[in-house]
Image (cartoon, rainbow, N blue to C red):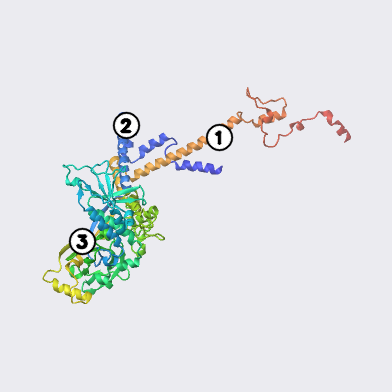
């Protein structure tokens, strides 16, 4: 009880307004606040009071509207980018060089022998003369001859077909090695020849037929506008299935070796050779060699800009040993990247053409992004939910590695095997036609599915700090006609110890890689809105529209606190009054006084007056507390006759 009284008294002391009603508190606030509008509301006449009330309400609404915009702008976490240029000793980038052809044809030819026979026969079939608008069917007895000379089982796993779309509603599908033309509804016929048919309309579309399993009707056709594209894609799919079953050590042996590919090397004024390169196996380009990767030793620094202080290489790509149907481009594939990062040459690499001297001037851009909540970037990939399959190379995180790892994980999950072009998770095998007949159909469906691609894009993050190398490329014929004789003699002797010329212009590439300028650009992000900006903007709007300051906000907070105290006091008073009303409802009469209790005890004829209509019984009254009154009859004076015997005895 004492604690309750103390709490109520404390509430009264904390309430600083002039009274204990909301109206009194509001009038007191308007009269004492430093904000301009409320004072005029209570001091002006009726008309001006209405005008000032309207203006105060309007400008207060504008303040809250502007505050909402400012807070929303702050919570959007926008950034601003700034560009700065600095000068310092810079690390020379890691340089990865590969051959555009992944394997020597002389080494891999036994594995691709049957595949080459199939594609040669298919090309003869595709390029043969047409009859009218249709391709000539095979003779009836030619299918037996084909089955004896060609591995049609390999062909039937992923066949090439011709699609005649003269009739868009009923296209005719022609299997190259079948005697009949088939279309929807098992139709066998070619559209009639018309004289006004253009040469463009007479062309067939070559497509790759992909089925979920051999003999299945669940198939898809990958159409190509050119037969050259279709043949290359078909050959890549088939060779991928064959090479995926070859052990890694054997694939490395079939590729181009460093001592054969790197003929000369010079970094600045220091000579170097193939031993200064780190070898890795790249599924797209076979054996690749990285200079200044920084895995085993410190990265090299560049002291000055210019070609004299860069890297000079002479490469032999051996174009005469290219796989004819796998590599349609000839040259070297190279990429500049950071130390300890994996080179993704298919996306970021460039080609250097054979028979030329290619000079590459490098400019360095350093990107510094702000992390959460300003951007969804990562420092080292530890917060990315995708397992990085390229961690086996001990390389740093990159978004390219994350996207490929995500795709490979999805393919393993959906197709049951991994694609040959990406690293494998533990305990999983590469896809091939023997163990996974429908892998190509599954891979094509997964690659073209927007939902799967979006899933990987949402799961992966950009790195917060990144270094990009901007390249300026120039080329010239090398060697010149006047000097090619003695240059080829020297290079041939140094490589083969032969006095005969074993090199030619189609297989030689010279590279010059150097810093174009001895400076670097830093593109950094900073917060566009800070807490200081937010507070100053909020105060500026409040001061402009209402003439207020921080102290006015404190006053407004004070009246809110006083209103809360008044509410608490009113609630306590209401609860106390409710308790008293319940007690009066239980005992409607006032308790008897002491004189009434004494009179009732001494005079048995005295009856306490009860209210009319009372239904309460006497025995229902609660017992009266305290000591009972004394027996006043013992004090009465006895008559004289009562004391006579005693006196006589005395």
Q: Earlier in the sequence, mark 1 or mark 2?
A: 2
Disc 1 designates what residue? 579
Q: How many marks?
A: 3
Q: Earlier in the sequence, mark 3 or mark 2?
A: 2
- Marks 1 and 2 close (CB-CB < 8 Å): no
Decide if residue 6 is on the left or right side of residue 629: left
Q: Determine the CA span between mark 3 and mark 1.
A: 87 Å
Of 138 and 611, the residue lying toward us: 138
- Frontmost of labels 1 and 2 is 1
Q: Which residue is mark 2?
A: 49
Q: Estimate the spatial distance between the alpha carbons at disc 3 and disc 2, rounded to whole Å.
A: 73 Å
Nearer to us in this view, 604 or 489: 489
Residue positioned most to the right: 649
Residue 471 bears which disc, if any?
A: 3
Q: Is residue 455 left or right of residue 618?
A: left
Q: Does 369 sit above or below residue 551? A: below
Neighbours of disc 3 within 10 Å: few (<14), some (14-19), many (20+): some
């Amino acid at each position: 009880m004492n604690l309750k009284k103390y709490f109520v008294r404390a509430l009264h002391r904390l309430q600083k307004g002039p009274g204990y009603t909301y109206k009194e508190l509001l009038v007191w606030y308007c009269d004492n606040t430093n904000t301009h509008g409320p004072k005029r509301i209570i001091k002006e006449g009726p008309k001006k009071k209405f005008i000032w009330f309207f203006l105060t309400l309007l400008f207060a609404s504008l303040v809250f509207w502007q505050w909402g915009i400012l807070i929303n702008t702050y919570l959007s976490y926008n950034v601003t980018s700034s560009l700065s240029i600095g000068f310092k000793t810079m690390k020379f980038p890691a340089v990865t060089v590969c051959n555009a052809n992944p394997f020597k044809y002389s080494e891999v030819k036994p594995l691709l022998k049957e595949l080459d026979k199939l594609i040669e026969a298919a090309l003869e079939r595709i390029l043969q003369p047409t009859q009218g608008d249709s391709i000539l069917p095979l003779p009836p007895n030619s299918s037996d001859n084909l089955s004896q000379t060609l591995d049609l089982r390999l062909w039937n796993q992923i066949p090439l077909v011709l699609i005649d779309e003269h009739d868009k509603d009923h296209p005719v599908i022609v299997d190259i090695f079948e005697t009949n033309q088939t279309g929807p509804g098992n139709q066998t016929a070619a559209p009639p020849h018309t004289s006004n048919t253009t040469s463009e309309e007479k062309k067939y579309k070559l497509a790759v037929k992909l089925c979920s399993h051999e003999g299945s009707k669940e198939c898809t056709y990958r159409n190509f506008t050119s037969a050259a594209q279709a043949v290359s894609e078909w050959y890549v799919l088939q060779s991928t299935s064959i090479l995926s079953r070859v052990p890694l050590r054997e694939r490395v042996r079939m590729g181009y070796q460093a001592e054969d590919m790197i003929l000369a090397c010079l970094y600045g004024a220091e000579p170097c050779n193939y031993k200064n390169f780190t070898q890795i196996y790249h599924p797209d380009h076979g054996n690749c060699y990285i200079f200044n990767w920084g895995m085993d030793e410190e990265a090299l620094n560049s002291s000055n800009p210019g070609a004299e202080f860069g890297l000079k290489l002479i490469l032999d790509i051996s174009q005469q040993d290219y796989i004819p149907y796998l590599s349609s481009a000839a040259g070297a594939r190279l990429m500049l990247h950071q130390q300890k990062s994996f080179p993704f040459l298919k996306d970021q690499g460039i080609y250097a053409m054979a028979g030329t001297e290619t000079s590459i001037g490098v400019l360095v851009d350093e990107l510094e992004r702000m992390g959460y909540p300003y951007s969804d970037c990562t420092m080292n990939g530890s917060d990315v939910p995708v397992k990085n399959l390229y961690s086996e190379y001990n390389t740093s995180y990159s978004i390219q590695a994350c996207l490929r790892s995500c795709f490979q994980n999805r393919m393993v999950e959906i197709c049951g095997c991994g694609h040959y072009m990406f690293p494998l998770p533990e305990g999983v095998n590469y896809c091939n036609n023997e163990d996974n007949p429908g892998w190509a159909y599954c891979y094509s469906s997964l690659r073209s599915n927007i939902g799967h691609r979006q899933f990987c894009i949402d799961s992966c993050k950009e790195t917060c700090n990144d270094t990009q190398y901007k390249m300026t490329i120039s080329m010239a014929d090398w060697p010149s006609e006047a000097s090619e004789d003695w240059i080829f003699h020297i290079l041939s002797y140094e490589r083969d110890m032969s006095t005969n010329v074993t090199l030619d212009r189609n297989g030689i590439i010279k590279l010059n890689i150097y810093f174009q300028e001895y400076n670097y650009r830093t593109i950094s992000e900073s917060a566009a809105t800070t807490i200081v900006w937010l507070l100053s903007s909020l105060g500026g709007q409040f001061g402009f529209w209402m003439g207020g300051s921080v102290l006015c906000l404190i006053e407004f907070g004070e009246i809110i606190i006083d209103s809360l105290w008044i509410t608490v006091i009113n609630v306590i008073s209401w609860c106390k009054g409710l308790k008293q009303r319940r007690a009066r409802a239980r005992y409607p009469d006032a308790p008897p006084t002491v004189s009434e209790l004494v009179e009732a005890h001494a005079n048995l004829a005295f009856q306490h007056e009860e209210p009319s209509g009372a239904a309460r019984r006497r025995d229902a009254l609660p017992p009266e507390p305290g000591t009972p009154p004394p027996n006043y009859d013992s004090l009465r004076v006895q008559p004289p006759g009562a004391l006579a015997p005693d006196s006589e005895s005395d």
